[in-house]
Image (cartoon, rainbow, N blue to C red):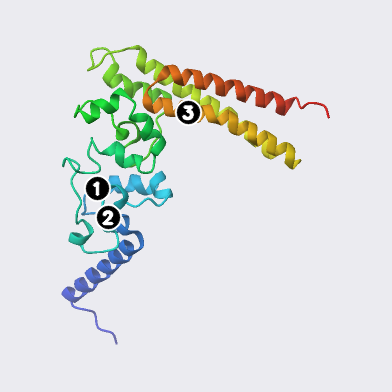
Amino acid sequence: MSRALPPVAGLLMAALALTHAHQALAQQGGCVGCHMSRPDIRGGRHVTERDTGPHGRHDVGCEACHGGDPTTLDPLRAHRGMLHRSHPASPVGRISLPGTCGGCHAGPFTAFQKSRHYELVRAGDRDAPTCATCHGEVAGMLLSPRQLEAQCASCHGVGRVAPNNDLPVEGRLMLQGIRDARAQLKEAEALIRRINDPSRRAAFEEAALDANAPLVAATSDGHAFVFTGLQERLALARQRIAALYDRLVNPAPR
């Protein structure tokens, strides 16, 4: 006949089991595993956004941006060397953040360095946008054209710190143009994959790459906030995509 454990012993065993569960999760997921398994630890939403966004899908660890040691369960060793974002030397502080993001996103960072926004960030302007302004602190989100317009208007709208009514609208139209062109190119690429002849398919794949090149450059111009260059590259991309479609649906006679 089994005997029930005393209340204190039962609580101790439950706590021990919970501790082992926390340790198992932490060992499986490093920083994320520990922070997700401990609801009493701050930053739960931040960690969730990382885990469910592109950084989580590509297994980018927290230490890539924050530093620290994700291999230990000891809090002191895990956070050794980490600095709060308010510290001037923090890699996730406002001034350093673009360079930190640029460690993986070199193209956007190179373009951003050419912008007036980057100059303002480096000068310590608290109103100037950083990568996190449009993409979130860790979520890696992509704003819709309307969301981008609203974000731009927060500084460039009437009565704001740098009013310019044209800029938010231009930003929305340019982003919408890039998105539409990418969608058209994606449809063309789906048609290309259905071509059976290898040499003919390879020729169309090369044409699709040529059409995508100015789109990549236009996106770079967007990170530099150079709308004139963006318009020119977007027009070239549209021209190449239209020519590609024409060749796909109206093949030349053999």
Mark 2 to mark 1: distance in Å? 8 Å
Q: Quadrant of residue 240?
A: top right
Residue assigned mark 3: 217
Q: What secondary structure is found at the residue carrying circle 2?
A: helix
What's the residue at 34%, 52% (across, down)?
Answer: 61
Residue 116: x %, y % from top left: 29, 23
**Identity, as a three-letter code, of the amino acid under mark 1:** Gly
Give how far apart the Cα atoms at labels 1 and 3 are: 36 Å
Q: Which residue is mark 1?
A: 43
**Element on which disc 1 rests:** loop
Residue 190 position, x and y percent, is: 64, 36
Res 166 quadrant in image: top left
Nearer to us in this view, 204 or 7:
204
| Three-letter code for the amino acid on which mark 2 is drawn | His
Estimate the x, y position of residue 29 in percent, counting from the top left. Answer: 35, 59
2 and 1 marks in contact (CB < 8 Å): yes
Real-space CA distance between mark 2 and mark 3, rounded to the nearest whole angstrom: 39 Å
Most distant residue in the bottom direction? 1
The amino acid beneath tag 3 is: Ala
Look at 16% across and 74% down and name the residue there.
8
Q: Which residue is tagged 2?
A: 35
- Asked whether 48 or 128 is in front, the reply is 128
Residue drawn at (22%, 39%), measured in percent from left and top? 93
N-terminal of the two: label 1 or label 3?
1
Residue at 39 percent across and 38 percent down: it is 106
Would residue 137 be seen by someone viewing this image from the given angle? no
